[in-house]
Image: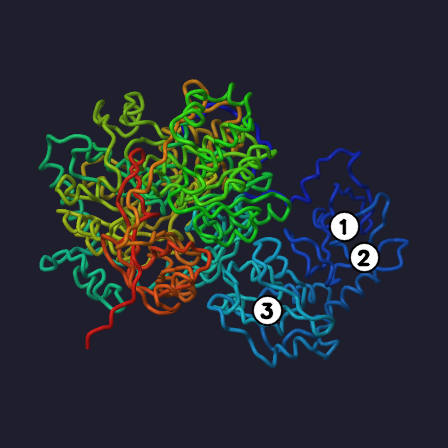
Amino acid sequence: MSAFVQTQPAAAGNHAASANAAHPAQVGQAATDAATIDFELDGRAVRASPGETIWQVARRVSIEIPHLCHREGLAPAGNCRACVVEVAGERVLAASCCRAPQAGMTVRSDSERARRAQRSVLELLNADAPVGKTLKHDSELAHWTAALDADPQRFAVRGAMQLDAAAQGADRSHPAIAVNLDACIQCTRCLRACRDLQGNDVIGLSFRGGQARITFDLGDSLGTSSCVACGECVQACPTGALAPANGAYAQVAPTRVESVCPFCGVGCQLTYQVSNGRIVQVDGGPGPANEGRLCVKGRFGFDYAHSPERLTVPLIRRADAPKDPSLLTRGPGGRADAAALRAQFRAASWDEALDFAAAGLRRVRDANPHLRGREVPIAGFGSAKGTNEEAYLFQKLIRSAFLTHNVDHCTRLCHASSVAALFESLGSGAVSNPLRDVEQAELIFVIGANPAQNHPVGASWIKNAVERGARLVLADPRRTELARQSWRMLQFQPGSDVALLKAMLQVIVAEGLTNPDFIAARTQDYEAWRSELIDGPVDYSPEAMAPICGIAPDAIREVARAYATSRASMILWGMGVAQHSHGTDNARCLIALALLTGQIGRPGTGLHPLRGQNNVQGASDAGLIPMFLPDYHRVTDPVHRAAAEAAWGLPAGSLPEQPGWTVVEIIDATLDGRIQAMLIQGENPAMSDPDSAHARAGLANLQHLVVQDIFLTETAALADVILPASAWPEKTGSVTNTDRTVQLGRKAVACPGQARADAWITEQLARRLGLDWDYDIAPDGSGAEPGSAIGRVFEEMRSLMPSIAGLSWARLLAQGAVTHPVLTADDPGQPIVFVDRFPTPSGKARLVPVGLLPPAEQPDADYPLVLITGRQLEHWHTGAMTRRSQVLDALEPLASVSLHPEAIARLGLRPGGLARVCSRRGAVELALRADAGLPLGSCFIPFAYVEAAANLLTNPALDPWAKIAEVKYCAVRVEPVPPRSA
């Protein structure tokens, strides 16, 4: 990212310039007098901007008008009539949430006639409210009733819907949301939140008149409906008719803390509500990435932090407890026996545990003083789930204490191939445009990604864009949720990405749909690239590629033409593109699509690999990768090595020029003794690495393994010492989302027991390894103030990172969200990059030819199916956090393998029954699930379940450029589970 030297004004697409951006209807306040509307409101001369309603003007000038059906961000409905106002000269009262002002109009919201009508509406609604029940401590109905001195007992008759709902009782069928429709006032805010914001279409309004009622799907209970539990309806409900199932709405939480969601890369801002030291509720915050929206994990998955399984004391392996990977599957239902895992360790004090941890690392280091660079037998895995400061300190520790670049994190298993291709072609691994630029796109091309499951809030912006007229093309071997919104669905054969994409490229070139001016001014190597595509030995026409990718030639041509000719086309991709042995080639093709057509550097265009973890972007920015120092300065560059040495107080020439080993290479090296000791912070390679049996054997083979984590994970179970660390809500630090937006996470609750902040642990280890660190980081994770120790770490980090040179700790504290590159203190941040040039020596992007390569392992008679792995909506990554959330685990408690219904029938199996899935590396047993969206020759397994770990099956074959494993494709067979012997 340091290669960014361009500047760009805060223009279209700058969603991240402010975390508290105004509602679109309020943006016109500075419009010219000619465009504004002058009128009188409650005796005051006021001015409306085009598009503003009377209610919005009143709110802006601090005049309160009661309202219940209206909510900022939702389209006005005008059905509750609590906001009626009197307009001079008009016979009937007007709903101010819907009515636009006119020049010279005289409006009274406080006239006797208006107030009488407002009170009557509130009194009628109170007649329908349940008696003696407090569902929501801050009920808006109760608030406005009191504010207008309305009489809640004036009318005693309840409506038919409420009487029927009261007779039926509350719907408690859903683990996250309680439904009490007897408190429903039919404001339809829940319906509009579900339909218009999240795009889920679960909530409807059935029947008419007095019989009208809110329904889920076709009258189902909420628990059996298609609800995805985003909770947008709960956040929108003014009365508590829809409320958190844990009863949080009924009580006042005395503490509110603004922070950022710890799950996916979207980076949603949120507000923790804390009572008695525990998070009891989470609300969406006004962040640039989410504007109040959340998904089920962000809103209801917070209780993992309070799990009784949290590590609360340091642990040291007992001398009589050898490392045994089989313990990880030797327990009830194939899950590890927690008591057996814990029995391997004894409790220790912090001083003893830190001394023991550091002594083992020193012992291996000092026994090999002649080794340097990647030959040093020590490595570290940092975390993409922590803060930028933690990632920076971790890579600094490994590099400074051991003089090696053997440090990596989960980006190696996620988007390493995307980053490799982007750096190679564009000179930067950054996304070019923020995810929300789909709002400005005319065509959205989503390939190898399932945003509805993995980035749900991001998916909601895609749905909104489609609703406004954008065309969505979904390309994936699986027919996933967004197919319902897609203009065209390209369900190509697994592993045939290059065939499909090169056919599209061939159409664009052969039909003259390229952008010649852009190619000439902004790219290089076009003629050689074109020659390989058009005149090379392989025919890449749609007719030639159709048998390989499984997509009809006419469909390929139609999509290629639409992409090339639209005003603004944007590409989003996920790990379905990246996690292949040809993942870099896949990404090269996507880059070529954008470059050939000039669909980059403008609002609504560009390339966006959807980052998986909440801080995989920030951890990479901070240097937590073996070939780059902070800000993507190559370790082979002596100038940047010297800068790091100076900043870290190391003798000149200390840092090696040789890049370190990557994740899978490090695991391989643990088995043959080239890596003998490791420090792992918040990563779980025993679950996340391909061919997990191989990974677990390697970890068990280490002479010394130090793990800091919040749970006794599968990796921690193989450690020599475990250091109990802080969960996300227990510390302060910055985090960078998929849009490159740096945001501030704030401490909301205390660490349990003796658990300590990760950054404090790293500093204590550094001191014991001979490094003179003097940050004095707070062990309790605090630091959200100017001049804090974490703030000093951030300042040191940015001194090595030109991309955030203009973002001081003080500025981040004040603004909360700024998108890098931010080059100077007055730079608002640059959400869209590559506007005028690419950060390459020539300023031009390279077009890189690719060939057709098959996946490393092909199906055969013994293993006839292709296994696709991935995440689920309810569970994240290896499940360490989400499977310890009561709500999330209740929603999706069982490991499952999904097959097409016809494939299940052919195998003589039945949905719901058990099946065994076998590969050349292992076997798992799990429940069978029917999914008509899967191709007949494939199956799908989520990898969050230790009792049926998908990565016991996956192939560790590597992409030669990025060293990413092919976990999205391997050959398996599915068979019945043999009868158990008595």
Q: Where is residue 117 shown, x and y percent of the image?
A: 80, 65
Q: Quadrant of residue 880?
A: bottom left
Q: Quadrant of the C terminus?
A: bottom left
User: What residue is pinned by disc 2?
Assistant: 94
Instruction: Determine whether label 2 and label 1 are within 8 Å by CB.
Output: yes
Where is residue 120 drawn, in percent x and y? 77, 69
924, above or below 496, in the image: below
Q: Secondary structure at mark 3?
A: loop
Amino acid beneath label 1: Ile
Residue kind at label 3, given as amino acid type: Leu
Q: CA separation, marks 2 and 1?
A: 10 Å
Q: Residue at x 64, y 46 (%)?
A: 468
Q: CA distance from mark 2 to mark 3?
A: 34 Å
Q: Earlier in the sequence, mark 2 or mark 1?
A: 1
Q: Which residue is mark 1?
A: 54
Residue indicated by mark 3: 218
